[in-house]
Image (cartoon, grey):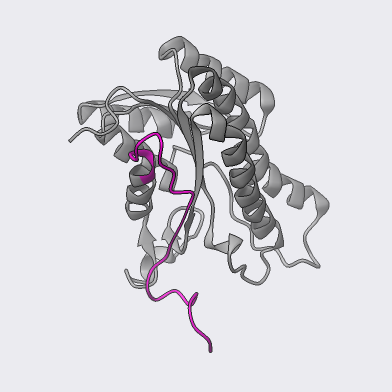
Amino acid sequence: MIRLKDRVAVVTGASSGIGAACARALAAEGARVLLAARRVERLTELVKEIEQAGGVAFARRADVSKEDEVEALFKAADEIFGRVDLLVNSAGIADHTPTDAITLERFRHVMDANLTSAFLCSRAAFIRMKAQKRGRIIMIGSISAKTPRPHNIAYASSKFGMEGMTRALALDGRGHGVTVSILHPGATITELMPGMGDRGPEHAMKAEEVAAIATLMACLPDETNLIEALAFPIGQPFLGRG
């Protein structure tokens, strides 16, 4: 069953990790995908992979923390597809700087990469979705928005902010056919977390497993919203007391 046939999806952070996995999964469901990231050579390789599997994909280089580049990205979506049905905000960076060592410059950089980018892309998508009376935005959050780790102040702040943004956008979109939700992954094997792949499946998920949940969200009926999902490997020390 091709559940997203002819839907148009914009996926940020698509050059690796969860973003790339989401792009593959959405394309496999029939979505036509516009891939955005700064590493255009990675995007080009992914486009070829999706096309070889029978999907439709285009690549656009974009630093989605910059307003002009986001506007250019969504203008490209207008020109190529004429609409945007789905946005997956997966762009972002990790940070593990202790609070007493982090500079204002670094804090702002993390917030721009993780939160400002989500705002800029969501605003651009929301304008289009509101006009067409249909659309869905999915944020890739983090388990750190539920239980932060030490030395996590910038990253946790950005992901807590993303959850608040999700709820505000969901409220604003409620009367216009626009659904907004957030997926909080736990430990996941990506380039952001070197060495995670050595932990074993009980302690680190694959990006494809996170993408499967995002795709489930995307494939729900337009009138249904799974507003929040939290997924983590069973060995991650999130539940219970020590």
For image coordinates 36% across by 47% down, the residue present is: 211
Determine the residue positioned at 59% across, 69% down: 147
Percent position of residue 161, x then y? 67, 50
Q: Is residue 14 one of those drawn in magenta?
A: no
Query: In the picture, which quadrant includes the N terminus?
Result: top left
Q: Residue most toward the left?
A: 1
215 displayed left or right of 170:
left
The image shows residue 84 at horizontal and vertical percentages of 46, 22
Q: What secondary structure prevails in the magenta region?
A: loop
* In the depicted structure, whether residue 111 falls above or below residue 15: below
Instruction: Give the left or right position of residue 62, taking residue 35 as reference.
Output: right
**Residue 75: in sight, yes or no?**
yes
Work out whether residue 223 or residue 121 is closer to the camera in this orientation and state it. 223
Does the rendering let one see residue 89?
A: no
Q: Is residue 215 above or below residue 65?
A: below
Residue at image coords 55%, 23%: 130
Q: Residue furthest top?
A: 79
Quadrant of residue 44 in the image?
top left
The spot of residue 64 in percent (x, y) is 60, 32
Name the residue located 46 percent from the left edge and 26 percent from the top edge. 134
**In front here: 74 or 110?**
74
User: In the visual, does 81 lie left or right of 201?
Assistant: right
Residue 121 vs residue 42, the one in the foreground = 121
- Highlighted range, magenta: 217-242
* Badge count: 0
- Drawn side of residue 16 relative to residue 208, left or right: right
x and y percentages locating residue 227 in the rendered image: 49, 49
The residue furthest front is 175
